[in-house]
């Protein structure tokens, strides 16, 4: 009887290890790549909008020049941005544990502002540069930078929490 009980305990330990390896693989194949892609997108956004703001503050610059430069920067990460938005949207509703769902929800929130979808951080600013004065465009770019910085912090917190859950379940 004791031998049977010990075998059952060993089997449960083996199952826990197997689950931990599966969880680590899930983290490595689903969470980590999205975070890595968003890290690159975030860096591109920070550089693009900071450069945009610097240019707008120079008296000789025009909003048309800024719009052209911003469009060029937006194109650099468009495919990656679209892939991340779609993937996060699909995984947000279909994955476990809850920490992983929160991570994907944070990733999607990074691309939304006031209920308006952003693949449009760039397109909203571009639209303003075509019809807005420099002070209005500067205000919009500052708001965009604040939005992406705030949401980047949320993404990082949720990523860390997801990693913590997977590391804890790995042992």
Image: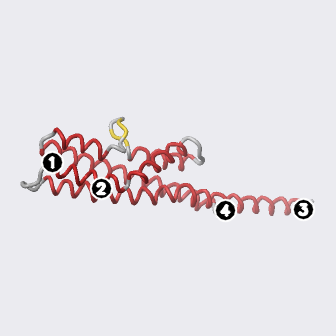
Q: Residues within 10 Å of mark 4 (few under 14, many from 20)?
A: some
Up the image or down, 46 lies above or below 92; here it is: below
Q: CA distance from mark 1 to mark 3?
A: 79 Å
Front label number (2 vs 4): 2
The answer to whether 151 appears left or right of 167 in the picture is left
The mark that comes first in sequence, 4 or 1, is: 4
The residue tagged 3 is: 2
Q: Position of residue 96 (x, y in %)?
A: 60, 47
Q: Position of residue 1 (x, y in %)?
A: 93, 59
- Determine whether the residue tagged by mark 2 lies in a helix, strand or loop: helix
Q: Residues within 10 Å of mark 1 (few under 14, many from 20)?
A: many
The mark that comes first in sequence, 1 or 3, is: 3
Residue 61: name its quadrant: bottom left
Q: CA distance from mark 2 to mark 1?
A: 15 Å
Of residues 157 and 129, the one nearer the viewer is 129
- Determine whether the residue tagged by mark 1 lies in a helix, strand or loop: helix
The residue tagged 1 is: 63
Q: CA distance from mark 3 to mark 4?
A: 29 Å
Question: Which residue is found at the position 53% from the left and 59% from the top?
Answer: 163
The mark that comes first in sequence, 3 or 4, is: 3
The C terminus: image quadrant: bottom right
Q: Are marks 2 and 3 in contact (CB under 8 Å)?
A: no
The residue tagged 2 is: 73
Q: Among all residues in the image, which is located at the extreme right?
A: 1
Front label number (1 vs 3): 1
Give the colouring mode of the picture. secondary structure
């Amino acid at each position: 009887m004791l031998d049977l009980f010990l075998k059952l305990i060993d089997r449960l330990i083996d199952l826990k290890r197997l689950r931990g390896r599966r969880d680590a693989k899930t983290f490595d194949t689903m969470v980590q790549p999205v975070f890595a892609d968003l890290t690159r997108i975030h860096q591109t956004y920070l550089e693009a909008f900071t450069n945009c703001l610097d240019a707008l503050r120079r008296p000789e610059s025009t909003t048309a020049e800024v719009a052209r430069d911003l469009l060029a920067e937006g194109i650099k990460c468009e495919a990656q941005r679209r892939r991340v938005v779609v993937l996060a949207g699909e995984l947000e509703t279909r994955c476990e544990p809850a920490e992983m769902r929160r991570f994907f929800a944070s990733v999607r929130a990074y691309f939304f502002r006031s209920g308006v979808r952003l693949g449009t951080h760039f397109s909203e600013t571009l639209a303003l540069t075509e019809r807005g004065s420099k002070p209005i465009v500067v205000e919009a770019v500052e708001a965009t930078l604040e939005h992406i910085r705030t949401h980047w912090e949320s993404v990082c917190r949720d990523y860390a929490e997801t990693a913590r859950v997977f590391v804890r379940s790995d042992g």
